[in-house]
Every structure is written in C-alpha cells, then in structure tokens.
Amino acid sequence: MQEFMARLSKREKTVLTLSVIFVLLALLDRAVLHPIIEKITSFEQEIKDTEYVMTKNLKILQQRRRIEREEKKFASYLIPARSDEEETAALLREIENYARTAAVYLVDLKPAGVESDGVTKKFSISVSCESELEQLIRFMHSIESSDVLMQVGAFSLSPKSKQSSVTKCELLIYKIVLL
C-alpha cells in the first residue's frame, strides 16, 4: 500500500484521500447517522401520537367530571327500583303527608295508572280534596317543589257551596321515575 501511495502524484493523493473520506462519510451516514435519525423521527412520531391520545383522554376525563357533577344534581331523582305497587303506595303516602301538612282534607285518593316509555315510568294519582283556597295552593306548591319529580297535571276547582269558603278540588298528580 505504501508503494502504491509513493507512485501517486500529489494531486492523485489528494483525490484519493477525498474519495476515501467521501466513502467513509457515506458509510458513516448509512451505518450510524441514518438509523439514529430514523429512531429520533420514530420517537417524535410516537410522542405526537401519545400527546394526541393524552389530549383526547383529558377531554374524556373532563366530560366524565362534568357528567358526574350533573349526576349529583339529579341524584335525588334516582331512587332504588321498586315494583309499581310499592312505588304507587309510596306516592300515595307522600301525597297524604303533603295534604296533612297543608291542612287539606282528602276525600278520595286513588291510583290512575302507570305509563312506561323505557326510560321513565309515569305514575298517576287521582285526588279529590277540600280545603280553603290558600291551603290548596300551598298543597299544590309543595307537590310541585318536592324533592322527587312530581307535578300537578290537570286540576279543577269549584266552591263546595255558594256561600262557603271551602273549595272542592280534583287533581291529577304525576310522579316520574327514571329507570
């Protein structure tokens, strides 16, 4: 190899040296730098994918927290599952308690049916009662503002007699239960 180098001119030595350096740089690029750059690129892509997944998961967690807060608002409306008869009996007791508190005399109190749509059940109670108008309004207000989903549907008011301050009332009270 030294003989070969000794026979070469200065210009040929320079070209040979540059050629060897170029080949070594190309080998270095293909053997060392290119795999490192590919690895870095794959890591960067993996980081971007992980960031995307984490961002998506954070959004899901925020939605979950929002849903849990909303669930707490409506937790009082979610009651343990009971049979229709048990639920109707509980509703009748609640109405009797509200009537007693408002000093309303219940003449007749009877179930008027149950309707279900798969998501909710609607229990209906037919109520006939008598009382002063102010007490009837207090009774209806207490039903409407109860902790459970109850509402006064249809109602009719009429005086018990011409000169009496007592009012007769026919009510249809609904209770909605979420399934």
Image (cartoon, rainbow, N blue to C red):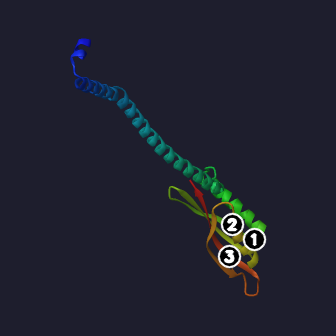
Residue 78 in the image, given as x and y percentages of width and height: 62, 54
Does residue 38 sit above or below 161 in this rendering?
above
Q: Give how far apart the Cα atoms at labels 2 and 1 are.
A: 20 Å
**Side of 14 relative to 87 (left or right):** left
Q: Secondary structure at mark 2?
A: loop
Residue at (60%, 51%) from the top-left corner?
68
Q: Amino acid at mark 1?
A: Tyr
**Side of 17 relative to 112 (left or right):** left
Q: Amino acid at mark 2?
A: Ser
Q: Nearer the viewer, mark 2 or mark 1?
A: 2
Report which residue position mark 3 lands on: 169
Upstream in the sequence, badge 2 or badge 1? 1
Upstream in the sequence, badge 2 or badge 3? 2
For label 2, the crowd category at 10 Å Cα-Cα, with few meaning under 14, some 14 to 19 and many 20 or more, is few
Q: Nearer the viewer, mark 2 or mark 3?
A: 2
Q: Amino acid at mark 3?
A: Cys
Residue 89 picture quarter: bottom right
Residue 52 in the image, given as x and y percentages of width and height: 46, 45
Q: Secondary structure at mark 1?
A: strand
**Side of 34 relative to 172 (left or right):** left
Q: Which mark is residue 145?
A: 2
> 94 or 106: which is nearer to us?
94
Q: Are marks 1 and 3 in contact (CB under 8 Å)?
A: no
Report which residue position mark 1 lands on: 105
Residue 159 in the image, given as x and y percentages of width and height: 71, 82
For label 3, the crowd category at 10 Å Cα-Cα, with few meaning under 14, some 14 to 19 and many 20 or more, is many
Residue 45 picture quarter: top left
Residue at (77%, 83%) from the top-left corner?
165
Regarding residue 153, the answer to whether it shows in the image is: yes
Q: Secondary structure at mark 3?
A: strand
Give the number of callouts: 3
Upstream in the sequence, badge 1 or badge 3? 1
